[in-house]
Amino acid sequence: MQQARHCFVWPLRLFLRLRSAACALGLLLVLAVGPFAPARAAPADPSGLWWTKNNGSIIKIVPCAKLFCGTLVWLKEPNKPDGTPKTDIANEDESKRARPVIGIQILIDLKSDGDHWQGQAYNPEDGKTYDVDFKVMTGGDTAEIRGCVLKILCKTDTFTKAQAVPKPLAVQP
């Protein structure tokens, strides 16, 4: 009877020893390689002037507190047909509808999230604020901005780095 019990015990002991050795080896590997594992890459600095889609406007992104913010600094067509500056007429807050569109903070509280920036974007065309991801692409001359409604309906646009803010266009009579 003792010999039969021995047949079942030694495989169990062998298994437990192998499992312990594998765990110890795994722990040694983690401790040895851990300091050399690549760190999570910080996203590229989004600061600067950016042309929006179709070069219709320029947004200036600057640090604000520990985050980044973007302000609309140039519009291809800054005035309404009557010659007065375009205003934030679609804003849900009635008290803000008379403010000029140029100077409005468009990108709000962009914070680092892996290889991109996350925050919000205000769209003066519809007066709504959307969740966005902003990623400066390799080379730093372009960026992708992806805006979403309820994280389901999303749209991606490409921004291009601008060197300077152009002078306002002359008003045609």
Image (cartoon, rainbow, N blue to C red):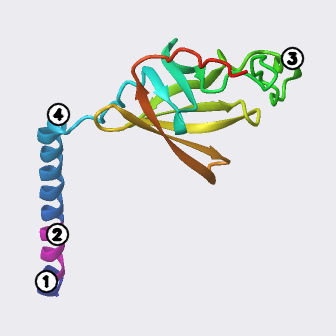
Q: Closest to the observer: 31 or 5? A: 31
Main SS category, magenta section? helix
In this picture, residue 40 sits left or right of residue 13:
right
Upstream in sequence: badge 2 or badge 4: 2
- Please report the bounds of the magenta region as a residue range: 7-15
Q: Residue at x 67, y 19 (%)?
A: 171
Give SS at disc 4: helix
Residue 40 on image: x %, y %: 30, 36
Which residue occupies 52% across, 26% down? 110
Lower position in the chain sequence, tag 1 or tag 3: 1
Q: Which residue is mark 3?
A: 95
| Number of numbered labels in the structure image | 4
Q: Which residue is mark 1?
A: 7
Q: Which residue is mark 2?
A: 15
Task: Identify residue type, mark 4.
Answer: Pro
In this orientation, which residue lies closer to the viewer: 173 or 15? 173
Lower position in the chain sequence, tag 4 or tag 1: 1
Pointer 4 residue: 35
